[in-house]
Image (tube, helix red, strand yellow):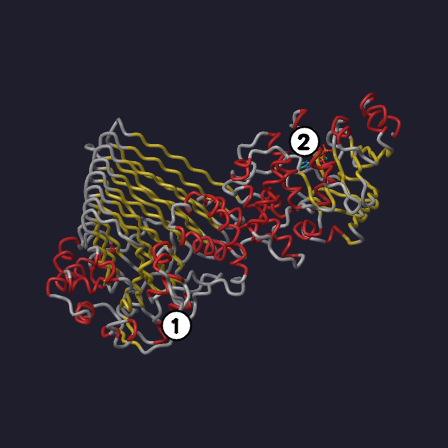
Amino acid sequence: MLELKDLHARLTLEGAPDRAILNGVTLTVPAGEVHAIMGPNGSGKSTLSYLLAGRPGYQATSGSARFLGEDLLSLEPEARAAKGVFLSFQYPVEIPGVPVMTFVRAAMNAQRASRGEAEISAPDFLKKSRAIAERLRMDPDMLKRPLNVGFSGGEKKRLEIYQMLMLEPRLMILDETDSGLDIDALRIVSEGVNALRSPDRAMLVITHYQRLLDHIRPDRVHVLSAGRIIASGGPELALQLESEGYDALIAGAG
Amino acid sequence: MPNVKESIEAGTIEAVRGLEADRYSEGFVTDIEQELAPRGLTPDTVRFISAKKEEPEWLLRWRLDAFERWREMKEPDWALLSYPPIDYQDAHYYAAPKNAAKYKSIDDVPKEILDTYAKLGIPLREQEVLLGVEGARETAAAARETPRIAVDAVFDSVSVATTFKEELARVGVIFMSFSEAVREHPDLVRRYLGTVVPPTDNFFATLNSAVFSDGTFVYIPKGVRCPMELSTYFRMNARGSGQFERTLIIADEGSYVSYLEGCTAPMRDENQLHAAVVELVALEGAEIRYSTVQNWWPGDSEGKGGVYNFVTKRGDCRGARSRISWTQVETGSAITWKYPSCILRGDESVGEFYSIAVTNGRQQADTGTKMIHLGRNTRSRIISKGISAGRSNNTYRGLVSVHPRASGARNFTQCDSLLIGSSCGAHTVPYIENRRADAQLEHEATTTRLSEDQLFYARQRGVGEEQAVALLVNGFVRDVIQKLPMEFAVEAQKLLEVSLEGSVG
Ligand SMILES: Nc1ncnc2c1ncn2[C@@H]1O[C@H](COP(=O)(O)OP(=O)(O)O)[C@@H](O)[C@H]1O
Ligand SMILES: [Mg+2]
């Protein structure tokens, strides 16, 4: 479903280091699978997720990224979203004055429009929203507040997953969704995420911790270091990292 | 309430999609035979206008006095605006559809003009106001529930139609064109005209006092809550003309009125002058809410053409516990020079100013307010949202003045500027004159650039770039939009989106 081949990338942002951040990432995530990406701080995990989502300033210099057989890198971010790419941000952005529901409805209808589908009716939208908020144990009043403004770290993460469940994407990239969540919240959010697991969807879960992978069981685990995948394995690789740390693995790969 | 607003915001975005073809859909010209004053400005021009309107001698004198004063005045140059010198002799100071003075009812109004308003979505027949579609029949119940809006339609220098006059008259509300009021209620007009904005107030107000054409007159009697929204719709059509309207609203003791003004003009590659004067008088315990949605032709993206909008608007909270609130959405005009103000004379009176000013292309706006605290325990509140895009310039200029007698005066001012792109400018110029140690004055100001992070976040969720800008801007102005009457909140949001099209990418 997602195929990355020898992907290299650099930043073209003002003030950013003028050096390669990804140095040849090759990775295939078949439909129906969940892959975890682990790796030390600064190894390029968020860069990879931004690159896949199309963030301006993150530029692929060589290699390819295909989603459902299509070249992802040539599409605008909103076109990728309409094809089903969803990024749960490591640092969700505040949007003052725009209530959560207004925002999500605009997003949903924009995606629908670009797929040639009709708008969702207000009652259908509200019904769906209410059900998902309930499943994620969110206070419905939160959805009337401006997006992410004044939300705690954990609330913001929960809201990312609320949006994901509303939009029902096909490729889900979760960038450190567990950071900021307490133990109960982690379980609730993971249950929400698991509900979207299906044979025609795929997931990339970026995390440092096994405790998330206890809830969202990955099919494969990859370790990213200095912009390169240095190890891949089954779920046991995450357990090994948990006990031994990244250093041993990186030393071995170096 | 919040839920309705939310659905409006989402709905608006879709509605605006269809407008993308031409940014300024009001820019058409109505082809109609007209009557013009000869080009130029002399005492004879003033006499011509006064005679056209069959005015009494005192008003002609009043105009001529203003004209003499104006000749000695200098155009102000303190605003952050730059434009070539205006040749005041090179314009027609009166333009009207032929025979306009003889329209006795809507049936006399020529089809071209009716079509113009239909195209602009302004209802000139009362049943259209009720249900928005011609031929629909209202039930008594629907009539009570549907918000109704009385309209005075001003076409160039004359009012062509005023709706709901009779119904309003039944509760004692006077709602008519200014010219008509001079004939029918000369005493009221004479008593209040020029008492808030004196004929010598400033260059543009004095010019207006000499040559004003038409506008709206409103009187709300003691204790009456005006049963519907009142509105005036100004349309500038004639080539080479200016519009100089005059509006006077008096809210007698304990009364309430909400009034809205809208304006558009054809796309012309010459600059047209618009110099209006609006005077509001609120007597004891009265409240006036005045909203403006200003969408004069702003000129093309290179700055060719567009309306020069030099406007003096002032409200006098003359009685104790009176209240005046100005809400403005300014998206049009090549140049905007406008400072709707409140004189807080009555003890415990309240003045409010809520503003959204958008500039794009080569537009320039220098706008803000003055809150003059004269009475005890007077309060004022200023919320200004400036949005600059393209190569435009947007200035907030405001004065809060607390006089020695104004014990316990309070003001809160918040000025937020949003910059879209890197070639535009935003400026905040707040003046404070305080003669009271016990005054509480708070001022907050922010300037932010439309954030790439926010844009990307919205786009990642599937919202296209232009729509994402609209969404973010709507969020930025939300607290002001919520001050507008509901029906106009929708229109205002559409306008914002249309006027910011093409501002990114
Ligand atoms: N906007 C940016 N400005 C400057 N440096 C950046 C920026 N984004 C990423 N980097 C750098 O790129 C490298 C990879 O960062 P990132 O992808 O965020 O790592 P991870 O998510 O694995 O912690 C780091 O060295 C980081 O400092
Ligand atoms: Mg990261």
Amino acid on which the number 2 mark rests in the picture: Ile
**Quadrant that contains the C terminus of chain B:** bottom right
Q: Nearer the viewer, residue B265 or B64?
A: B265
Q: Position of residue B117 (x, y in %)?
A: 37, 68
Q: Is residue B3 left or right of residue B312?
A: right
Q: Is mark 1 within 8 Å of ligand 1?
A: no
- Please give the name of the residue rendered at 15% of the width and 65% of the height, measured from the top-left corner: B183
Q: Which label is found at residue B115?
A: 1
Amino acid on which the number 1 mark rests in the picture: Asp
Few, some or many residues within 10 Å of mark 1 (<14, 14–19, 20+): few
| Farthest top residue in view | A243
User: Is the residue B20 above or below the residue A233 in the image?
Assistant: below
- Please give the name of the residue rendered at 23% of the width and 35% of the height, measured from the top-left corner: B348
- Please give the name of the residue rendered at 26% of the width and 56% of the height, measured from the top-left corner: B277
**Quadrant that contains the N terminus of chain B:** top left
| Chain assignment, label 1 | B
- Please give the name of the residue rendered at 32% of the width and 78% of the height, measured from the top-left corner: B33
Tell me the residue that label 2 is attached to. A188
Q: Position of residue A184 (x, y in %)?
A: 66, 26
Q: Nearer the viewer, residue B488 or A207?
A: B488
Q: Is residue A249 left or right of residue A46?
A: right
Q: Position of residue B263 (x, y in %)?
A: 36, 60
Q: Quadrant of ligand 1?
A: top right
User: Is the residue B219 above or below the residue B29 in the image?
Assistant: above
